[in-house]
Amino acid sequence: MNLVLRTVVVDRDAAIRREIKSVLAGTDLVCLVAEYSDCSLFPASADLPDVVVVGMDSDTDSALDLINRLARQVPRCGICAVSRSSDGQLILRAIRAGAKEFLTLPVQLNELVTGLRSATGLPDARGRGMQSCQTIAVAGAAGGVGSTSLAVNLASILAASPERAVVLVDLDLTLGDADVYLDTIHEFTLADLTRNVERLDAELVRRSLARHKSGLYLLPRPVELDDANLVTPEPLRRVLGLLKATHSHVLIDLSKGYSALDMSALACCDTVLLVTQLDLPCLRNVVRLLKSFRPVPGLSEKVKLVVNRAMPESETIRLKRAEEIVGREFFWQIPNDYRLMVDVRNNGVPLIAQAPRADITQSLFGMAQALCGDGKSGDKTAGRSGVPAPMFGKWFKFLSSMANKSSLTAH
């Protein structure tokens, strides 16, 4: 999982705020969730971030008061003071007030990252309540293999757990249809966020997302084809950073073009689910894609191969032979249920709501368990064999309750 430090910048000088934000944009460790032009405007009680970067030069006394207040009220918060001055007395006053780090401007990226890590106590910060997010890209080995249906239904299953905040990003900017699968029409799209990337903060992003009744949040693709050109790699990274700072799971439904935008998204992910079918054209593409991923540091290790529409009794290419062809094991098999998938897509209802007891739904539950690390030891083998993985704990209880609701509704 990615650990993201939610960061706020406070300084009266707009030029200094821009300078700090420019440096912060160079690392995935940090997500800027807000900025304030006045120390007095910083809220007395709020969902405080992990790091507050406080400028000392514009109003030193107010900055020291803010540092002192934060240090007393929220001891876990990492406070980092910054100044163009390296005066020893100023540094001493900031440290005595409660700052955990003092950086002199202009600051280099490596110095800033080191300072923020020190201020928050990394690498031991995971126990301090910081935002940890799992980011999953869903990619197809060819068009029509069912990668979007997998992304939508996997995201809906993850969102069914109350302790999770899950968002799905539709990155197929021209022909994406995640909104159709969820029967959702929304005012804001990915293009709107990237168009206004300079003024984005966590609250604006939250208000821009469509919320499905399942609890899943959706960031749809642009409505107009021309607006696809507004989405470029750097603004996308900024948007994904904000999503990772405010959600437990971010799923990205890639296009089939593997463009610079798709590759930028892949670089931001922890896991890549590469969806294929057991036919020669798809497997050939899997080999090509895996080869093209090798030069990108760390990307090949993220890839998990998923067989969709598995039909073990009728496939001409068996799983073992397919693994020999592509040179690695498959992570999961999802059984074929074409008629049900057509129904849920046309109805705009996820599998978890329409058919919670179906084999395909249970297989996706097992995949969700395996990806989140809360499955039992036998789950992976069950998924690979095409047999639905067994449900355990809260997942079993939730699935049973969904099934009972469906039975009552049917009667």
Image (cartoon, grey):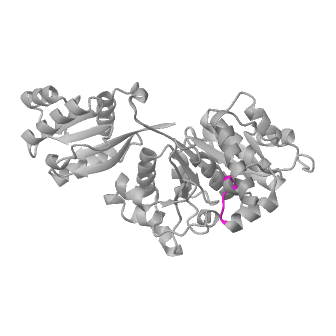
As rendered, which of 163 and 130 lies closer to the eye? 163
Query: In which quadrant of the rendered view does residue 196 lie?
Result: bottom left
Q: Is residue 393 above or below residue 211?
A: above
Quick one: 371 or 119, which is closer to the camera? 371
Residue 12 x, y percent position in the rendering: 14, 50
> 34 or 114: which is nearer to us?
34
Indicate the position of residue 146 as horizontal and vertical percent values. 72, 57
Q: Is residue 260 left or right of residue 382?
A: left
Is residue 67 visible in the rendered image? The answer is yes
Residue 116 is left or right of residue 156, and the answer is left
| Residue 385 placement, left or right of 41 | right
Query: Is residue 304 in view from this perspective?
Result: no
Magenta segment: 348-352
Judge from the rendering whether residue 228 lies leftward or rightward of residue 406; answer left or right: left
* Prevalent SS, magenta region: loop
The image quarter containing residue 54 is top left
Q: Residue at x 14, y 29 (%)?
A: 97
Question: Where the C terminus falls, by quadrant?
Answer: bottom right
